Each structure stands twice: as structure tokens, then as C-alpha cells.
Amino acid sequence: MTKPIKKLLAPKTLLLIGVGYTILITIAFLFPKVTLPNTENVSIDKWIHFFIHLILILLWLSVYFSFYKHKNVLRSVGLVFVLCLGYGIIIEVLQEVLTQNRTADYYDILANVGGSILGTLFFIKTR
């Protein structure tokens, strides 16, 4: 009896982690900007964006596939990929519109795309 209960709770726990992570990074992206040092033409900020989106897409792909079992994996992965990229773009727009000391940055979006691509490829390869 406990095995079916554990099976039902696992996706919900993963969903809570995904929602919590998304809320956490949304708050972090909309808080006042912290000045980060630059290293060799690429600021640490871009690497942070890269890894945040790598984790974001891995987490949401895991959530999605824990709830839904689709035959067309590529289409499902594409849906999550587009939603995560849309989220990244919306956050950049909100930084421009809602905050006074942050601006939208195309390079942040490129870092988001890079992290999302690597995360997606890693998920597909390990799935």
C-alpha cells in the first residue's frame, strides 16, 4: 500500500520544488541589482543566467515528464523549452519595466537560451 502512495507523492514534491525554484529566481531577478565582477569579457552575471536556466529547464522537464507520459517526447520537450524561454524573456521585460536599477539585456536572454539548450540536451541524453 505504501508504494502507490510514494508514487503519487513524488511528482507533487517535484512540482513544489519546481514552483519554489521559479518563485525564488523570479524574486532574485526583480530585486535590486548586485554588482558582479567581470572575467575575460563575460560577466559572471551571464554565467549565473546560464546555470539558472539550465537548472530551470531540467527541473521543469522532470516535473512535466513525471506527470505526463507522451509518445512524442520531442514535442513535449519543445513545449517545456519554449515555456522556459518565454519565462526568461518575460523576466527581462519585467526588469526593464518594474525595476529602476535593472535593465533588459539581450545577452542575458542569450545566456538563458544557452542554458536551456544545454539543459534540454542533457535531459534528452540521460532520459
Image (cartoon, rainbow, N blue to C red):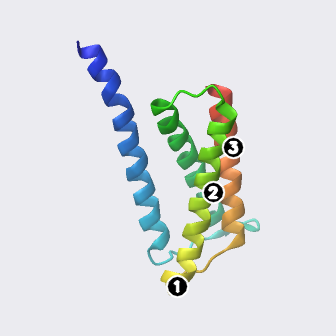
Tell me if 58 is positioned left or right of 110 in this view: left
Q: Nearer the viewer, residue 55 or 64?
A: 64
Cα distance, mark 1 to mark 3?
Answer: 30 Å
Outermost right residue: 41
Q: Position of residue 108 (x, y in %)?
A: 66, 66
Q: Which residue is mark 1?
A: 101
Question: Where is mark 3, residue-wise?
Answer: 118
Q: In the rendered structure, which amino acid carries the disc numbered 1?
A: Asn
Q: Above or below — where is 76 with respect to 117?
A: above
Question: Whole-percent x and y of residue 24?
Answer: 41, 59
- The amino acid type, in three-letter code, at marker 2 is Leu
In the rendered image, residue 37, in percent from the top left (x then y), is placed at: 61, 71
Q: Residue at x 30, y 22 (%)?
A: 6
Q: Which image quadrant is residue 31 in?
A: bottom left
Q: Is residue 94 left or right of residue 31?
A: right
Q: Residue at x 65, y 31 (%)?
A: 73
Rendered position, 7 above or below 25: above
Quadrant where the C terminus is found in the figure: top right
Rounded to the nearest whole Å, what is the CA distance between mark 2 and mark 1? 23 Å
How packed mark 1 is, by other alpha carbons closer than 10 Å (few <14, some 14-19, many 20 or more), is few
First along the sequence among labels 2 and 1: 2
Mark closest to the chain's N terminus, 2 or 3: 2
Q: Residue at x 35, y 44 (%)?
A: 16
Q: Is residue 33 above or below residue 47?
A: below
| Dot 2 crowding, Cα within 10 Å, few <14, some 14–19, many 20+ | many
As drawn, the label of residue 85 is 2
**Mark 3 closeness class: few <14, some 14–19, many ≥20 residues within 10 Å:** some
